[in-house]
Image: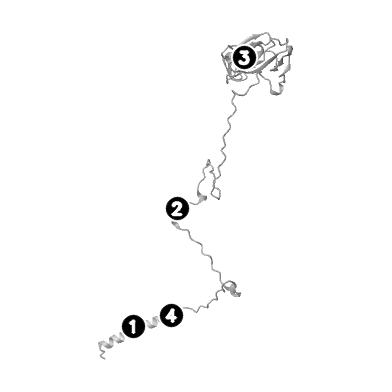
């Protein structure tokens, strides 16, 4: 049977359309959209009775930007130096409060603190004899430090030997000029001077300058150091 070219084209087209239609029907039957039941939205301004049936959607968690996260390291991971110095924090109102300046106090210098000038004598052993009455109506403007004969007498402060002198009242004495050049320390009734003590000698606090005795007007056997402090205006005119 002879079929014209036109009929052949139409026949081929018919087969193609039929195949396409069958494929569409198959896909629709297998992957077609199922019916969806609509859910009523809650009424504005208040919850409706069906609010309990309304599924709650989870709040989306913002994902940090990758570049920002890489640029800003976490505070917990920052190492803290062991000797880090804390810095003052600015108050919330933006007004910085000035931290008090703390100046460490310097230790007292050994040149300004007087040493008990008799070796081995403790503060509680001192007897207050200042302003005690003496012969000829005199006032005892000094302190007598009782100690056995020969006990070392020590320089009470740094300074220099101003004068070595023997007198009827003071016996063997030593005058020491303090570092301020205005204070004189007087040691009297010495038994003798320490070796090497001469006028002008620079003394160090605690250095042995002599020994306890009973020379001068101290009664025999009354061994003690007569210690007195003078304030002067001119060391050259002290005498």
> Given contact means CB atoms under 8 Å apart, are the residues at marks 2 and 3 in contact?
no
> Given contact means CB atoms under 8 Å apart, are the residues at marks 2 and 1 in contact?
no
Q: Quadrant of residue 161?
A: top right
Q: Nearer the N terminus, badge 1 or badge 3?
A: 1
C-alpha gap between disc 4 and disc 3:
127 Å
**87 to the left or right of 191:** left
Q: Quadrant of residue 4?
A: bottom left
Q: Nearer the N terminus, badge 2 or badge 1?
A: 1
Query: 239 above or below 75?
Result: above
Badge 1 density bin: few <14, some 14–19, many ≥20, Cα 10 Å: few
**222 to the left or right of 83:** right
Q: Identify which residue, 28 or 90, lies in the foreground.
A: 90
Foreground disc of the pair 4, 2:
2
- Which quadrant does the N terminus fall into? bottom left
Secondary structure found at label 4: helix
Secondary structure found at label 2: helix
C-alpha gap between disc 2 and disc 3:
78 Å
Q: Which mark is residue 175?
A: 3
Query: 219 above or below 32?
Result: above
Q: Identify which residue, 229 or 212, lies in the foreground.
A: 229
Q: Nearer the N terminus, badge 4 or badge 3?
A: 4
Q: Nearer the N terminus, badge 4 or badge 2?
A: 4
> Given contact means CB atoms under 8 Å apart, are the residues at marks 4 and 3 in contact?
no
C-alpha gap between disc 2 and disc 1:
61 Å
For mark 1, what is the residue?
16
Secondary structure found at label 3: strand
C-alpha gap between disc 4 and disc 2:
52 Å
For mark 4, what is the residue?
28
For mark 2, what is the residue?
71
């Amino acid at each position: 049977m002879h079929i014209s070219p036109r009929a052949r084209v139409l026949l081929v087209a018919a087969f193609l359309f039929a195949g396409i239609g069958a494929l569409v029907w198959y896909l629709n039957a297998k992957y077609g959209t199922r019916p969806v039941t609509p859910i009523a939205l809650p009424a504005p301004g208040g919850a409706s009775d069906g609010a309990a049936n309304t599924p709650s959607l989870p709040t989306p968690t913002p994902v940090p930007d990758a570049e920002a996260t890489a640029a800003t390291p976490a505070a917990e991971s920052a190492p803290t130096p062991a000797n880090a110095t804390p810095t003052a924090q600015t108050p919330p109102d933006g007004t910085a409060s000035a931290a008090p300046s703390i100046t460490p106090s310097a230790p007292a210098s050994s040149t300004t603190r007087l040493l008990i000038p008799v070796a081995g004598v403790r503060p509680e052993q001192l007897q207050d004899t200042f302003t005690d009455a003496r012969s000829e109506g005199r006032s005892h403007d000094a302190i007598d430090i009782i100690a056995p004969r020969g006990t070392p007498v020590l320089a009470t402060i740094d300074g220099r030997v101003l004068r070595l002198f023997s007198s009827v009242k003071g016996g063997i004495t030593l005058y020491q000029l303090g570092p301020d050049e205005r204070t004189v320390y007087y040691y009297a009734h010495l038994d003798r001077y320490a070796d090497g003590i001469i006028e002008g000698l620079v003394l160090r606090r605690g250095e042995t300058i002599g020994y306890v005795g009973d020379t001068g007007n101290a009664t025999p056997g009354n061994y003690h150091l007569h210690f007195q402090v003078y304030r002067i205006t001119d060391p050259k005119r002290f005498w």
